[in-house]
Every structure is written in C-alpha cells, then in structure tokens.
Amino acid sequence: MKVNFFATLRQITGQKTVEFELAPGSSLRTLLDLVLAKFPPLRRELLDEHGNLYQHVHIFINGRDVPYLDDKLETIVQPEDVVNIFPAVGGG
C-alpha cells in the first residue's frame, strides 16, 4: 500500500510516497503502526502522549478525513486505497 506524505512530514520520511506491506483486512491503525515503526520521529508529529491522533493532523483515505469515517482509525484499508497524511498547516 502506498502512503503519501505532505509538507514537513516529507522531510522526516525523505520522500513523498512510501510503500508498505499490509495484510488483507488490516485497519488504518495497523498501517499507522507500520509507518511509525519505519519512521519513529513521526510519532511526535502525529500522536499525542496517549497514542491518539492529534486533531490538527489529517489522514485521508480516498479523500475522506479519518475523523469523519465511521470506524476512524479502525477503518479497514485496501491495497488500492489512497492514503495521504498531512501535518498541521499554519498560515496567515
């Protein structure tokens, strides 16, 4: 499964897109665990001290933001799904 990283997260991963081996029927949480195992510095960028996704971080599955999915991080992802991870973005 391919995961796309944006903005400052690309500096941590060193690339825009990273491919992960994911067993069929795996959840987004499982994919996130694989991402964090490969790139441990992402943990402080994506998760709070309780292991919950920061509200200002956005993970999209096929264009849908995780907080708006029925199963949130427990959503089952398919190999053909498009997963995009965005850090907090500020501007003014």
Image (tube, rainbow, N blue to C red):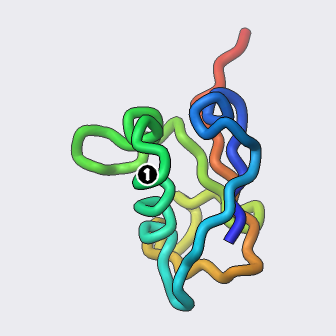
Specify the farthest residue to the left. Answer: 50
> At 66% from the left edge and 82% from the top edge, which residue is drawn?
78
> At 43% from the left edge and 67% from the top edge, which residue is drawn?
29
Vertical relation: 73 (above or below) 86: below
Vertical relation: 2 (above or below) 36: below
- Total numbered badges shown on the rendered structure: 1
Closer to us: 76 or 16: 16
Closer to us: 19 or 31: 19
Q: Which residue is mark 1?
A: 36
Q: Amino acid at mark 1?
A: Leu
Q: For mark 1, does the 10 Å Cα neighbourhood hold few (<14), some (14 to 19), or many (20 or more) residues? A: some
> At 60% from the left edge and 67% from the top edge, which residue is drawn?
20
- Which quadrant of the rendered structure holds the N terminus? bottom right
Could you say where residue 44 lies in the image, as x and y percent from the top left?
A: 38, 34
Could you say where residue 60 lies in the image, as x and y percent from the top left?
A: 66, 57
Could you say where residue 17 lies in the image, as x and y percent from the top left?
A: 74, 52
Vertical relation: 7 (above or below) 58: above
Could you say where residue 7 lies in the image, as x and y percent from the top left?
A: 71, 30
Closer to us: 3 or 77: 3
Disc 1 is placed on an element classified as: helix
Specify the farthest residue to the top. Answer: 92
> At 73% from the left edge and 9% from the top edge, which residue is drawn?
92
Query: Which corner quadrant of the image does residue 66 belong to?
Result: bottom right
Closer to us: 59 or 11: 11
Residue 64 vs residue 27: left or right? Answer: right
